Amino acid sequence: MSTRGIMFLKQWIANNVPENATADVISIDELTHKLIADAKAIGIKRVEIDEDVDSLYRTILDAIVRFGPGLTE
């Protein structure tokens, strides 16, 4: 397990998934590509993130659905 990968993922979601994000395939795909590019830019390989989550798509979808406007943790 990569602590660096999961910490990056959590912080990235907090900073980059807007409250008004929609849970559609295109939006989630775009966010996933941005996440991977941002990780690569700071030297984090995708495998460091992938080993901590089953699916980046589902992780971002969960973040949108669970923490959308008006929802609490």
Image (cartoon, helix red, strand yellow):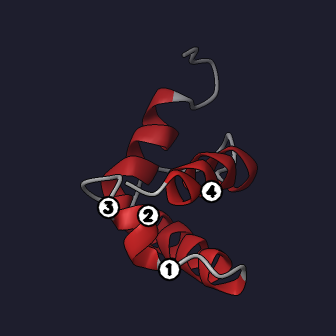
Return the x and y of residue 25 as percentages of the image width and height. Answer: 36, 65
Q: Secondary structure at mark 2?
A: helix
> Which of the two discs, 2 and 4, labels the residue nearer the N terminus?
4
Q: CA distance from mark 1 to mark 4?
A: 11 Å
- Are dots 1 and 3 in contact, CB under 8 Å? no
Q: Which mark is residue 8?
A: 4
Left or right: 64, with 61 as reference point: right
Return the x and y of residue 67 as percentages of the image width and height. Answer: 56, 29
Return the x and y of residue 57 as percentages of the image width and height. Answer: 35, 60
The three-letter amino acid code for the residue at tag 1 is Lys
Q: What residue is at 52 percent from the left and 60 percent from the top?
A: 5
- Are dots 2 and 4 in contact, CB under 8 Å? yes
Q: Which mark is residue 45?
A: 1
> Which of the two discs, 1 and 3, labels the residue nearer the N terminus?
1
The residue at which mark 2 appears reads as 49
Q: Secondary structure at mark 4?
A: helix
Q: CA distance from mark 1 to mark 3?
A: 11 Å
Q: Nearer the viewer, residue 70 or 33?
A: 33
Q: CA distance from mark 2 to mark 4?
A: 8 Å
> Which of the two discs, 4 and 3, labels the residue nearer the N terminus?
4
Q: What residue is at 38 percent from the left and 74 percent from the top?
A: 47
Q: What residue is at 50 percent from the left and 41 percent from the top?
A: 64
